Image (spheres, rainbow, N blue to C red):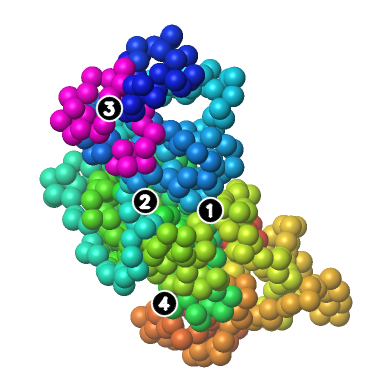
């Protein structure tokens, strides 16, 4: 290996490490950082020691040359341009920890080599490892660019974060080729159909919580495969502070300096699959994840896979995606500012380094310790009345309140479609009310439905009441479109009109866990 030391030859000759390396490698010296000499340098590794030389080396040394900077004294600050170096050698372990904390993801390879009898052997090990790094030259150059971009974002002066334009949409011909490839390959083994101008996978077994969790896994799997660090966020305890949006949607924070790398991760993770991304906050036309470009990355992305029930009545789309937010650090050592809604810690975060984990569907995701809360007291749902619409009320509960611990149905004779042996469900007689209720109870009636996702910390507001008998489905549709309440109620009189039954069956098509397999609807008037 040819090694060039950017140092005075007379002084370097007195260095025991240099003498030891010269016995194993082809070592030469260069007196100063002359740009012309650096451009024509023929060396495998270039080693510098003066802080001012590192910047010139990063600017003029050939791309194929590995660059290493050697910190001469303990406590010295990192040299300018450190993120674009391949390695930094510091004299003590304390210096290595300090550099790692200051540079964060912008740090190159860090190694502490004290000036002792084993220093030459450690240098030889480092240089051998760096030689292996050159085997994947495109990745090496890409990692250097990502570190430099992160460093620029972290040290940029404070300024308002302007809203960037959405990334350019792929050409029509490119999108058609992608659609044909996805149709031919399928998406996760499921059948694909067109829905709302997008390819969607047919599924009749997904509740809303499943769709949210599936989008979270899509985003986390791609970021982890590409070694892009992230943290799972938690919204404010008061859902009214989150602004527009769904309180149950998952959000991930990624450093803005790594936004291009994240876009490349999504593009490379889902080739030939019906996975889409939409830029935020523009809500532009969804782009296939495979065709995402790393240029003009938006402030945030929403990643999702569309799902559609076989009856074409329920669709999970962008509203059930996972948000990937690119957070900016306003100045070195300062807080990170987010591009979207605030979190439980407010509009800024002190760090994006994970300090804890949160579990979603038995999978751990990195997060901040402040986002891990004590378990909330369990909530039980109690149906005090039963009726023909109980089936759809239970479906709405399963779709929009998955945090319910146990469901009690007070009825002398339960409907035949109800699976009374199912765990999590208890049928109680009015003469013997349930005695194992939790401290928090959500009372419900059979004709009360949740119309949207309901966080565990919130209870339904005033109910929107309408007489359902004889109403056409188009009249009932207004109840579901309302956003000023979390629940609505249909006043039913003993039977369920056919039009209302068909409408509810279409709006709540996914069976709840408490329905017997193959059970047909009861209480429908001919």
Alpha carbons under labels 3 and 2: distance apart: 32 Å
Label 3 vs label 2, nearer the camera: 3
Is residue 311 visible in the rendered image? The answer is: no
Check if residue 435 falls in the magenta segment: no
Residue 245, percent across and down?
A: 43, 73
Residue at label 2? 150
The residue drawn where x is 57% and y is 56% is 367
Dot 3 surroundings within 10 Å: few (below 14), some, or many (20 or more)?
Answer: few
Q: Which residue is mark 1?
A: 353
Give the quadrant of the N terminus. top left
Q: Are marks 4 and 3 in contact (CB under 8 Å)?
A: no
Disc number for residue 509: none
Could you tell which of marks 4 and 3 lies nearer the N-terminus? 3
Q: Label 4, label 3: how many angstroms apart (C-alpha)? A: 62 Å
Q: Which residue is mark 3?
A: 31
Q: Earlier in the sequence, mark 3 or mark 1?
A: 3
Identity of the residue drawn at 65% across and 80% down: 444
Quick one: label 2, few (<14), some, or many (20+) residues within 10 Å?
A: many
| Region rendered in magenta | 28-55
Dot 2 falls on a residue whose secondary structure is: helix
């Amino acid at each position: 290996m040819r090694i060039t030391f950017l140092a005075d030859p007379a002084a370097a000759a007195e260095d025991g490490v240099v003498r030891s390396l010269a016995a194993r490698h082809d070592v030469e010296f260069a007196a100063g950082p002359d740009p012309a000499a650096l451009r024509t340098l023929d060396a495998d590794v270039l080693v510098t020691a003066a802080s001012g030389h590192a910047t010139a080396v990063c600017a003029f040394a050939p791309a194929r040359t590995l660059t290493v900077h050697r910190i001469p004294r303990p406590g010295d600050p990192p040299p300018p341009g450190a993120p674009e170096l391949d390695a930094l050698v510091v004299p003590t372990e304390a210096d290595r920890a300090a550099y790692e904390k200051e540079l964060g993801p912008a740090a190159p390879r860090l190694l502490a080599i004290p000036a002792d009898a084993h220093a030459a052997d450690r240098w030889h090990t480092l240089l051998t490892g760096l030689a292996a790094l050159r085997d994947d030259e495109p990745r090496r150059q890409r990692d250097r660019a990502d570190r430099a971009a992160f460093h620029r974002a972290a040290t940029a002066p404070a300024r308002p974060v302007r809203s960037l334009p959405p990334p350019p949409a792929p050409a029509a011909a490119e999108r058609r080729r992608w659609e044909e490839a996805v149709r031919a390959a399928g998406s996760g083994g499921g059948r694909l159909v067109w829905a709302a101008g997008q390819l969607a996978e047919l599924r009749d077994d997904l509740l809303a919580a499943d769709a949210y969790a599936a989008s979270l896994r899509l985003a986390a799997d791609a970021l982890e495969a590409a070694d892009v660090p992230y943290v799972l966020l938690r919204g404010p305890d008061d859902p009214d502070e989150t602004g527009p949006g769904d309180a149950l949607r998952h959000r991930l924070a990624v450093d803005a300096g790594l936004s291009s790398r994240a876009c490349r991760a999504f593009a490379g993770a889902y080739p030939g699959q019906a996975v889409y991304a939409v830029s935020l906050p523009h809500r532009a036309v969804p782009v296939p994840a495979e065709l995402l470009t790393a240029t003009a990355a938006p402030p945030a992305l929403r990643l999702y896979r569309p799902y559609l029930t076989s009856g074409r009545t329920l669709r999970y789309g962008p509203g059930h995606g996972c948000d990937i937010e690119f957070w900016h650090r306003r100045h070195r050592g300062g807080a990170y500012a987010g591009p979207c809604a605030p979190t439980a810690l407010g509009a800024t975060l002190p760090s994006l380094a994970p300090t804890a984990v949160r579990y979603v569907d038995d999978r751990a995701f990195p997060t901040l310790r402040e986002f891990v809360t004590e378990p909330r007291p369990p909530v039980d749902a109690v149906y005090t009345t039963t009726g023909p619409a109980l089936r759809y009320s239970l479906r709405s509960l399963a779709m929009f309140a998955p945090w319910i611990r146990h469901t009690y149905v007070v009825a002398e004779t339960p409907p035949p479609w109800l699976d009374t042996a199912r765990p999590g469900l208890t049928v109680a007689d009015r003469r013997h009310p349930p005695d194992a209720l939790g401290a928090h109870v959500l009372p419900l009636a059979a004709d009360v439905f949740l119309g949207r996702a309901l966080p565990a910390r919130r209870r339904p507001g005033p109910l929107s009441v309408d007489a359902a008998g004889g109403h056409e489905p188009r009249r009932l549709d207004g109840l579901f479109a309302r956003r000023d309440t979390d629940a609505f109620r249909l006043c039913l009189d003993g039977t369920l009109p056919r039009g209302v039954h068909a409408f509810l069956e279409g709006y709540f098509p996914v069976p709840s866990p408490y329905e017997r397999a193959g059970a047909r609807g009861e209480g429908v008037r001919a």
